[in-house]
Amino acid sequence: TESLYKAMEKRGRSFIGTALTIRNETIEETIIQQDFNSITPENAMKWESTEPSQANFTFDGADQIAAFATRNELQLHCHTLVWHSQLPAWVSQGGFDNATLIQVMEDHIAAVAGRYKDVCTRWDVVNEALNEDGTYRESVWYNTIGEAFLPIAFSLAAKYAPDTQLFYNDYNIDLNGAKTDGARRIVELIQSYGVRIDGVGYQAHFTQEATPTAPGPLPEQPDLIEALEKTASLGVEVAYTEIDIRMNTPATAEKLEVQAGIYERVAGACLAVESCIGMTVWGISDKYSWIPETFPGEGAANVWGESYEKKPAYTGFLAGI
Ligand code: XIL
C-alpha cells in the first residue's frame, strides 16, 4: 500500500516526518507507522518545557517523545535549543550579562542535547533568528550576545551532541526573498567561525491564497527551488521542517484541490534539489493544528482532516514525491 516515507526512500531521500504531541489518539501511531519515519516534538523539547526555571529540568514530555521514536524506529528531529519564543521569563527577562547568558545557554544545551544525544537524528539548534528583511531579530540572545550567539550555540550543540545533525531553522526563508539571503548569511557566519552546521530547515508554513496574515499566493516551484539552493550551495543539507498549507476557512472542495496542488508543488521542489533530505508536516490531523488559534479565520492546513480522513492533499503530496 501507499506510504509517504517509503515513496521518499525510493527517491533516495531520508525522511517524511510529522510534528507530534502525544495525546490520547491511538490512530496517530498507526498513521505514523504507515506514512512516516521521522517525528518532531511539537512542544515537548522547547525551553519552557524542559527548563521552566533555572537548573530545574523537566523531561517527562520529551522522554515520552524519545521513547515513541525508539519504539517505532523513527528518526527524531529535535526542536529546539535556542529560540526567542516559548522561552521562560527567567531567561528572556533575567538581565544576564553576555558571559552569564552564554553559561545559561551552555547549561541548557549540555542538559537537553546531552540527554538525547543518542536519539536525536537532527537538532534545530537555533530557531527563527531573522526578521523578514533578513536582518537579525531582536531577542535576548541577539541583544545580549550579538550575532556570535549563533556560532556559539552551534559549537555547544556539537560539543554535547556530536553525532546529531545540526540545523538552523526558520520560516519564510522558503519564499526566496531577503530573508532567504539572511539564512545564507547565517550559514556563512557559522562556517566562518569554523563551527559545524549540517543543514537548514525551511519551515514552510504556507498559505494557498492571500489571507489576513500573508500576502499570498505562494511562489511558483522554480522560486521554491532557488530558495533551497541558496543555502544548499554552501554545502549544507536542506529540508522542509514544518509544512502546512492554510486557507481561509471554511474549506471547500475547490480549495482542497488547490491545496493538494500546492502540497505537490512543495514536495516537487524538495525532490528537485539533491541536498533536500526530507520533509516534515506540522501535525497529522486538522483537528489539532496550531493554525486556527494562531491565525483566526484560517485553518484546514494539514494532510489529514478532522476525522483523520486523508484529504486530497495526501494524493497531492504523494504525487510530488
Ligand atoms: C507551535 C506549536 O505547534 C503550538 O502548539 C505552540 O502553541 C506554538 O508553537 N514555528 C515553530 C514551531 O518553530 O515550534 C511552532 O509550533 C510553529 C511555528
Image: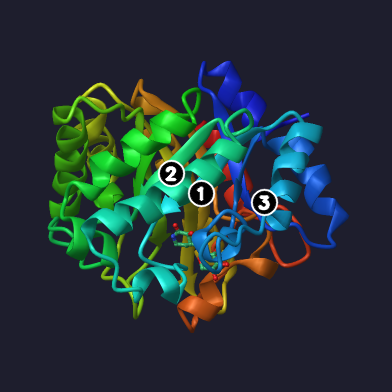
Q: Which residue is mark 3?
A: 62
Q: CA distance from mark 3 to mark 1?
A: 10 Å
Q: Secondary structure at mark 3?
A: helix
Seen in the image, is 162 located left or right of residue 220? right
Of pointers 2 and 1, the one earlier in the residue sequence: 1
- Give the spatial CA distance, label 2 vs label 1: 5 Å
Residue 6 figure quarter: top right
Image coordinates for residue 18, horizontal then vertical, percent: 61, 46
Q: What residue sits right under mark 1 in the picture?
A: 79
> Does the Cβ of the disc 2 residue fall within 8 Å of ligand 1?
yes
The answer to whether mark 2 and mark 3 are in CB contact below 8 A is no
Q: Residues within 10 Å of mark 1 (few under 14, many from 20)?
A: many
Q: Earlier in the sequence, mark 2 or mark 3?
A: 3
Q: Nearer the viewer, residue 246 or 41?
A: 41
The label on residue 124 is 2
Earlier along the polypeptide chain: callout 3 or callout 1? 3
On residue 261, the disc is none
Do labels 2 and 1 touch, CB within 8 Å? yes
Q: Answer yes or no: disc 1 within 8 Å of ligand 1.
A: yes
